[in-house]
Structure formats: C-alpha cells, structure tokens
Amino acid sequence: MRLHGNAVNSTQTCELPQQKLDEQKIIQTIIFDLEKNMESKFSERSEIEIPEELKHVLKEYSKSLIRSQPEDLLKWSAEYFRAKLKEENSKKPEDIIQQARCSSF
C-alpha cells in the first residue's frame, strides 16, 4: 500500500520487530521450562504445596530479568524484589480488595 508522500508497507505497521518476537519466544520457552520442571519435581513429592502465586511471581521476574540483562544478577534480583515489596506495601486497601476479587475468577 502506498500513500502520497510516504511509502507505507502494511506488514511493517502491524508486525512486531524480529527482536521483540525473539524475546517473546525466549520468555515463553523459559516459562514453559520452569513450569514443566516445577511440575515434574514437585509432583513426586505430594507433601509439598506450591503456592498459586509462585508461578505468577516467577513469570514476571523472569520476563523482567531477560529484558534487563543485568551484569550482577544477585544485586539486580535483590533490587527487583525490594521494589516489588515496596509496591505491594504501598497499595491502598481498596486496591487489595479489587485485586483479590479479580484473581478469584
């Protein structure tokens, strides 16, 4: 498709850059592997109960870690979880109630 004055390729405007697609594939692969590994290791030990929220926390952490590519993994991880804790502690009671309602569905 051509517009007067500017050449526009319709496929360029709708597609994500290849780097973003590669990043998403990497994230999906890591999350899939984490979930599969957790299931196989913990399914053998039925006495261990895995919190539902753990999968979400690990997914968000992994995505952020891959995007950030920190040189010092432990320092970055400590800062990441401090920021998450601060964010969680600053929530208003009505936000917590709303989050609980949404996550129960």
Image: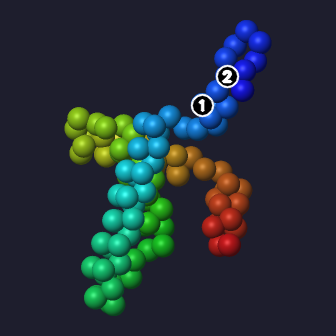
Distance from Cα at disc 1 to Cα at disc 2: 8 Å
Circles 1 and 2: CB atoms closer than 8 Å? yes
- Give the answer, above or below, for where 92 lies relative to 52: above
Q: Residues within 10 Å of mark 1 (few under 14, many from 20)?
A: few
Coordinates of residue 86 in the picture (x, y in percent): 48, 45
| Amino acid marked by disc 2 | Val
Query: From this viewpoint, is residue 71 visible?
Result: yes
| Amino acid marked by disc 1 | Gln
Query: From this viewpoint, is residue 81 visible?
Result: no
Instruction: Work out which quarter of the rendered image holds the N terminus and state it.
Output: top right
Asked whether, in this view, residue 81 is left or right of residue 40, the answer is right
Coordinates of residue 74 in the picture (x, y in percent): 24, 45
- Give the answer, above or below, for where 13 lies relative to 63: above
What's the residue at 55%, 38% (across, down)? Answer: 16
Foreground residue, 79 or 34?
34
Q: For the view shown, which residue lies furthest in the top direction?
A: 5
Foreground residue, 43 or 20?
20
Foreground residue, 59 or 11?
11
Question: What residue did someone put label 1 on?
Answer: 12
